[in-house]
Image (cartoon, rainbow, N blue to C red):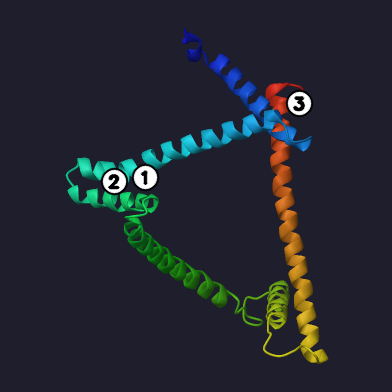
Amino acid sequence: MFHWLSDSHITTAVTIWIGALGTLAIYSILYKENPIYRIAEHVFIGAAAGYGIFITWVEMLKPAWWDQITQGRWYWIFALIAGAMFYFIYSRRYVWISRIIFGVLLGLVAGGAFKGFVGVNIDRISASFKPLYGQGLTATEIANNALFIIVLLAVMAYFFFSFEHKSLIRRAPAQLGRWCLMFAFGAMFGFTVMARMSLLIGRIYFLLHNWLHIAQ
């Protein structure tokens, strides 16, 4: 009955049609809220959830936990007990059990986040000390380093709220820092728009090339 699944040409065509109809269904939200978009949204979320569960088992739980137990490392059963403790949050009588494991998890996450925060920012602080003179530095590199330091100090002056920026000496660097921040946010927003447009162009190319065969 399903012998056609072994034909690569048929499966490729079916895949392209499903992708094209799914793309059109998702983009139908640009017209207005409609049942077709809702169906496509639910199918996408369901498929993503199912795929996530599959990937979690194949790439994480099986090699890091199940295979350890089947190879004789019985103590990995405590990981199952710790994981099961989270579900006591649904019990009013034994909810205190879930608080223990939530506390342990939050402590581990906070410690890891603090370690990552310190590591990343120490590197960034060290990288901000750029040289303005020395052997091997070209005029372009010196100009870039000087511009970087000026922008860095100006932005820091903008966020320095220990005293009011009344005098021109204090207000001018803060205003320059504000303009630099606006340029940076504008560039970030433009990059985000470019990424979205790149995705849109990719889907339009898929519809015109792979589905309708009217574009090369």
**Mark 3 or mark 1, earlier in chain:** 1
Give residue 147's position: percent from left, percent from top. 73, 76
Residue 22 location in percent, x, y? 65, 28
Type of amino acid at the residue the image marks with label 1: Met
* Residue beneath disc 1: 60
- Residue 91 in the image: above or below residue 136: above
Three-letter residue code for mark 2: Trp
Name the residue at 71% across, 29% down. 24
The earlier-in-sequence mark between 1 and 2 is: 1
Q: Residue 65, labelled with which disc? A: 2
Which image quadrant is residue 112 in? bottom left
- Estimate the x, y position of residue 53 in percent, counting from the top left: 43, 39
Per the rendering, the mark at residue 215 is 3
> Residue 40 falls in which quadrant of the image?
top right
Work out how far the residue at label 1 is from the one at label 2, CA to CA, in angstroms: 8 Å
Q: Are marks 3 and 1 in contact (CB under 8 Å)?
A: no
Label whose residue precedes the other's in the sequence (3 or 2): 2
Tell me: 168 left or right of 70.
right
